[in-house]
Amino acid sequence: MKTLADVFREALKEKGIESFGVLSKRFRKSKNKLQDVAVEIINGKGAIFRVPEKTAVAWDLNGNRVEGSHYAYAPLCMMEKFEPVLTPEELRSKLPEWPYFIIDLYHWNKHTQKEKGKVCLQVSQSYGLLRDYFTGRELAVTWANDEFERMFKGPIDRITLYAGPTAEFLRENDIDEVVLLDPWAEEVLSEKDFDVGAFIIGGIVDTGGNKKKTTPKIGEELENAGISVRRRKIVLRGDVVGVPDRINRILGIILKMMVEGKSMDEAVYEFQEPLHARWRLRKELPKRAIRYKVNGKTYRVVEKELFDEYSRWLKIRWEDFVKVLRELDLIALERKRIHHLNKISNPRIINGKTYRVILLKKAAMLCYNC
C-alpha cells in the first residue's frame, strides 16, 4: 500500500523534480523527510516552490542528502515571492482512499479518570503512527465527547472526531464492511482483510472488571445497524498471549503488516514489550519442563538454552527469563547436565504424569538459579 511519501515522490517526479530542499533548518533531523514535508503540505502549512538560488540543503527523492536544489519547501506566505509548483490542494487531489482506523469510545465512561488518561495517550500515539505512513487524518475517534476533547493533549485538529455512533460515521462515509480487531475472534487477521474501508479498534484499556469482553459487543451493535463485520484477532505463533494490548501497538502491528509487508509474528515482535513477552513465556516454559523426583521431592527443570530459542521471537532479556523461572518455581540447567540426569534416572508414571526418578540420596547437580 502506498504511503503519503510515495504519493509525494510521484507528484514531484511528474513535474520533473528530482530533489528538493528547505529554506530553514526544519526537517534536517527528520528520519523520513519526504513523509514529514508531505504531511506539512497536506495540512496547509506550506508548498513546494521554485527558488532562484539553490538551497543550502537538499535531498533526492529517496531522502538522501544531495547538493542544493532549485525547488524548496516553504510556508504558504512565500506564495507572492516564489513560484509554487506543488500546492496543498494539488497534493490532496492525488491522495488514494486509505482506510479509516477507528477508535470506538462507546465504553468511555466505564474507565476511571486514570484509565481515561491512558486512552487519550494511546489515541495520541496512534496519530503519530498513522502520520508516519499516511496523513494522520485516517485516525477517527467515534463517540468523542466533551470530556475526551478536554483531556486529549494531541493535535485534535489533525484527527477525525465524530460525536455519534460508529455505525453512523461508517454510513456517512459509505463504508458497509469493516474489520473489528477482537482478541476473542475465531479468525486471524490476514492480508486478505486489507481491502475494507475501516478497521475498528475498541477504545478500551485495562480490560478487567465491567470492561471484559466489550469488544465483541461493538461488533454486535454494528451488525445490528446493518454493517458487515469481519472479526479478526492478532496472534503470535497461533496464540493471543504475548500480543500487545495497547491501542496504539495494535494499530502499529496492522500498519507493519499492511504497508511494510511484515509477517504477523515480525510485526508483533516489533511492538512487543518485555511485559507482554513474559506473559507468553509463563505459558511456554511449563510445556518444556521435565519433572525429576529426588528423595521424594519434585523438581521441574528446563534447559537454560531455551532463553536463546525464545528470545528470537519474544522480546525478553535474561532478567525476564530468570524472573519467570522464579515465578513458576522452575530450575534452568544446561542441556548437557540434563542429558546426564536422564542417564542416571528412570521414567515413571505417577498420578498420570511422567517423572524421572533419581535414586540418589543427594543430587548436588540440581541447584536453583540465583
Image (cartoon, rainbow, N blue to C red):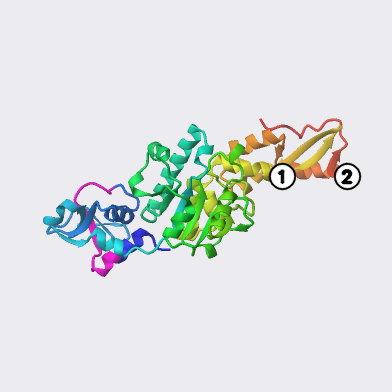
> Is 294 situated left or right of 187 in this image?
right
Q: Which residue is mark 1?
A: 335
N-terminal-most mark, 1 or 2: 1
- Start-end of magenta stretch: 11-28
Tell me the kind of residue under disc 1.
Arg
Q: Position of residue 239 (x, y in %)?
A: 64, 51
Res 332 quadrant in image:
top right
Q: Which mark is residue 100?
A: none
Q: Quadrant of the C terminus?
A: top right
Pick the front one: 8 or 306: 8
Q: Is residue 172 above or below residue 160?
A: below
Pick the front one: 325 or 229: 229
Does the magenta-highlighted stretch encompass residue 23? yes
Q: Quadrant of the N terminus?
A: bottom left
User: Few, some or many C-alpha atoms within 10 Å of disc 1 (few <14, some 14-19, many ≥20)?
Assistant: some
Q: Position of residue 294 (x, y in %)?
A: 84, 34
Q: Which residue is mark 2?
A: 349
> Is 129 situated left or right of 49 in this image?
right
Pick the front one: 300 or 99: 99
**Residue drawn where x is 48% and y is 52% of the image:** 166
Does the magenta-highlighted stretch encompass residue 7? no
Q: Position of residue 351 (x, y in %)?
A: 88, 41
Tell me the kind of residue under disc 2.
Ile
SS for callout 1: helix
As measured in the structure, the alpha-carbon distance from the residue carrying label 1 to the one carrying label 2 is 23 Å
Looking at this view, name the residue that lies furthest to the front: 225
